[in-house]
Amino acid sequence: MLKYFDAIRTLISVAIALVIAFIIIAFVSEDPLGTIGIFLTGPLSSAAQLGNVVEMAIPLMFTGLSVVLLFRSGMFNLGAEGLFYISGLVAAVIAIYGSMNGFLHPAAAILAGAVVGALLSAIPGIMKAKWNADVLVTSLMFNSILAGVGLYFLNYHLRDAAAFANVSYKFQETALLAKLIPGTRIHAGLILVLLCILATHYFMYHTRWGYELRMTGSNRSFAEFSGIKTGRVIVTVHLIAGLLAGMGGSVEVLGMYTRFQWTDLPGYGLDGALVALLAKNNPLSVIGAALFLAYIRIGADQMSILSDVPAELVSIIQAVIILLISAEQFLKMWKNRKLLKEAEKLG
């Protein structure tokens, strides 16, 4: 049982959050059972709704994977939000003004966004490695800076005045990602993110660099004593995490839109932290965590449309999950009892 303690703890946290949500629904809804039914089964009501779950999960997988790397290296960095935004804008520029055929156009746009994300992410990493700057503070400040810079370029250089909205010029058709399943908007970015998850898992658990990353996150002082150059590890993990977040922003823009239309940070970067918490910083578990979060959000959207309970209920669920998972003492007494029983058996 102790082997699966973290997984059990996460499942219990999710179950408690859902029970609290159902209790709230019982108090505010005129038809509690019907509303709960819509929330739980709405995403399965049609192929289009199920497609919406997968579509929403794609950017969550990218940012969740990015945050997993940072958290596993001991860096509480929330900069994926700004990187996701600015990289999407860079991809949009290539999609508008680039002139390429076939898969080269989206590939070039995604690569440009990913490289920008990596380079910008390296800045907080270098500051941490050289001057021990708090990455939480620097990453959050970078989010605001990148949002302001992106909005400036959208307003004064990319805005299509003929659209009567604060959106960019239209992307060229050759830059858009191919749709994988007819009747849905599931795009080729799904294949790309799954490949990234597999590559990240291999990197973390089957390479020397992955071992150094995990060792640095567990105990930086011991890692340095063992000969690991932790400063290099910190910069490297920021580069890779920024690459993934930048790739996610680029894929989202090219897969789901025909214009760049984010006038504010889209929120996927901060959601990546919740995905990482649910996944317990395991790359493969990011898939399930992202799908779960996307599922309850689509369920909440359906509930707000078809019942008398607003979609904001999902924010309560997310908040409770974060509180319980981040609470170190939650279920710790149960774990200690199990440890004592095992010790008694061995004794």
Image (cartoon, grey):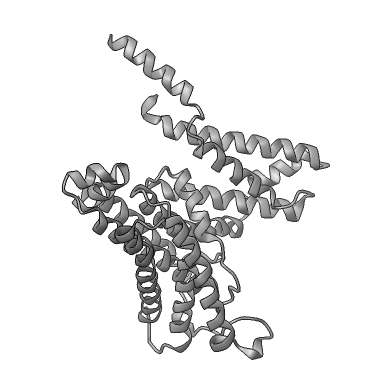
> Front-most of 12 and 116?
116
Q: Position of residue 103 (x, y in %)?
A: 37, 78
Asked if residue 343 lies left or right of residue 39, the reply is left
Regarding residue 33, the answer to whether it shows in the image is: no
Q: How many discs mark residues in the rendered view? A: 0
Q: Position of residue 15 (x, y in %)?
A: 58, 34
Name the quarter where the N terminus is drawn: top left
Name the quarter where the C terminus is drawn: top left
Residue 337, quarter of picture: top left
Q: Position of residue 265 (x, y in %)?
A: 56, 67
> Front-most of 159 and 239?
239
The residue depicted at 23 percent of the width and 45 percent of the height is 223
Above or below: residue 122 compared with residue 224: below
Regarding residue 145, the answer to whether it shows in the image is: yes
The residue depicted at 63 percent of the width and 38 percent of the height is 18
Q: Position of residue 26 (x, y in %)?
A: 77, 37
Above or below: residue 301 compared with residue 178: above
The residue depicted at 35 percent of the width and 63 percent of the height is 127
> Front-most of 295 and 154?
154
Asked if residue 265 lies left or right of residue 228, the reply is right
Residue 262, quarter of picture: bottom right
Asked if residue 29 lies left or right of residue 80, the reply is right
Above or below: residue 125 compared with residue 277: below
